[in-house]
Image: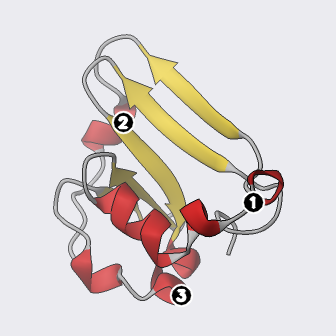
Amino acid sequence: MKNGNKNNGLFWEVDSGHAWLKVDMADLFRSGIYEDISSYSYVDAARGVAYLEEDCDAGTYLKAIGWDDRPQDERGPTKENYIDGDSWVRNLPSFTG
């Protein structure tokens, strides 16, 4: 899994009111929680990427891939793209599992 492989890390899209974890759709399918994702998350089907909302869906995904159980050196960096105001992610279609 891209978000689960050693040293690949996590990438967040963040705006002044919310954040979303960027996850490849293939990784999301492999995690087994695809049908549990809420409509508060978004999907970019053309790029094959989901943006999982921070309050519930991102945590569910990270738990499913065992992120917190991994040694720190296998987690990789956490990166974020901050936008002051509303993020472009909000313009994507809502996730429908």
Depth check, mark 3 against mark 1: the one in front is 1
Mark 2 = which residue? 19
Sooner in the amino-acid sequence: mark 3 or mark 2: 2
Describe the element under mark 1 as helix, strand or loop: loop
Is residue 45 visible to us here?
A: no
- What is the spatial separation of the Cα atoms under label 2 and label 1, in whole angstroms? 24 Å
Amino acid under disc 3: Arg
Q: Position of residue 27 (x, y in %)?
A: 57, 77
User: In the image, what residue occupies the spot 64% across and 63% down?
Assistant: 3
Looking at the image, residue 23 lies above or below residue 81: below
Q: Determine the residue located farthest toward the left in the rendered image.
A: 39
Does the CB distance between marks 2 and 1 fall below 8 Å? Answer: no
Position of residue 29 relative to residue 93, above or below, is below
Residue type pointed to by label 1:
Pro
Please name the amino acid that badge 2 sits on.
Ala
Q: Is residue 9 left or right of residue 42?
A: right
Color theme of the render? secondary structure
Q: Characterize the local packing of mark 1: few (<14), some (14-19) or many (20 or more) Cα atoms within 10 angstroms.
A: few
Is any part of residue 82 visible from this angle? yes
Return the residue at label 3.
30
Q: Secondary structure at mark 2?
A: strand
Q: CA distance from mark 3 to mark 1?
A: 21 Å
Q: Name the one closer to the observer, 24 or 69.
A: 69
Q: Nearer the viewer, mark 2 or mark 1?
A: 1
Q: Which residue is identified by label 1?
A: 71
Q: Is residue 84 above or below residue 81?
A: above
Residue 13 placement, left or right of 8: left
Q: Name the element at disc 3.
A: helix
For this rendering, which residue is in front, 10 or 82? 10
What whole-number distance in Å separates the C-alpha atoms at marks 3 and 2? Answer: 23 Å
